[in-house]
Image: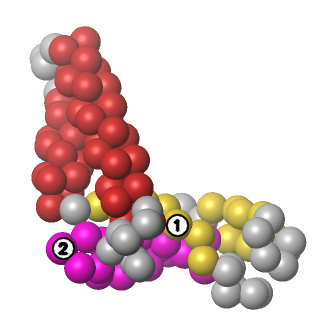
Amino acid sequence: MSNLKIYCNAGCQKEFEVKSFKTAKLPDKVEKTYFNCPHCDHEYLVHYTDIEIRKLQARIRRVQKRFADPNDNHEDAARKEAEIQALIKEKMDALRLEVEGEGGLNG
C-alpha cells in the first residue's frame, strides 16, 4: 500500500499518512478494516466485509488479471469488473447498516 495522506477532520485536525490498515474480527465472520490517526487515535472506517463480499473481492481480482493479457477481451473484462464492483458496493452498504444499525453486530 502506498502512503496515503489524510486530514484528521473528525479529531485533532492534523494531517497524517496512513501506512497500513488494521482489521478487526467481528461476530458472524465479519471483518472491519480501519485505520487510526496517530495523533489522537480517532478511528476511520474503511469498510466491513463478510464471507460473501470477500469472495466477490477475490473474483474481481481474477477478472482484473485479464487486463494483463493482450489477447483477452478487455471490454468484457471491464464490464464484468463494473458489475462485480457494483455488487460489492451494494453488499458493503447493506452490511454497514447491519453492523452499525440499531441492534446490529456492534450494539
Give the farthest residue toward the right. 13
Residue 106 higher or lower than 64, as above or below: below
x%, y% of residue 18?
61, 71
Residue at point 67%, 80% (across, down): 42
Question: Is 7 or 11 nearer to us in this picture?
Answer: 11
Q: Which numbered disc covers residue 23?
A: none
x%, y% of residue 95?
32, 56
Q: Is residue 1 magenta?
A: no
Q: Is residue 67 left or right of residue 102?
A: left
Question: Is 75 or 52 nearer to us in this picture?
Answer: 52
Calculate the distance from the C-alpha at mark 2 to the C-alpha at mark 1: 17 Å
Residue 25 higher or lower than 17, as above or below: below
Residue at point 33%, 39% (across, down): 90
Q: Which residue is mark 2?
A: 29
In terms of secondary structure, what is the magenta stretch mainly? strand
Question: Is 104 or 67 nearer to us in this picture?
Answer: 104
Q: Residues within 10 Å of mark 2 (few under 14, many from 20)?
A: few
Q: Is residue 30 magenta?
A: yes
The quadrant in which residue 33 appears is: bottom left
The quadrant in which residue 24 appears is: bottom left
Q: Which numbered disc covers residue 45?
A: 1
Residue at point 63%, 61% (across, down): 4
Bounds of the magenta segment = 18-36
Do the residues under discs 2 and 1 have CB atoms within 8 angstroms?
no
Residue 44 higher or lower than 58, as above or below: below
Q: Secondary structure at mark 1?
A: strand
Residue at point 71%, 63% (across, down): 6
Earlier-in-chain disc, 2 versus 1: 2
Q: Amino acid at mark 1?
A: Leu
x%, y% of residue 83?
25, 26
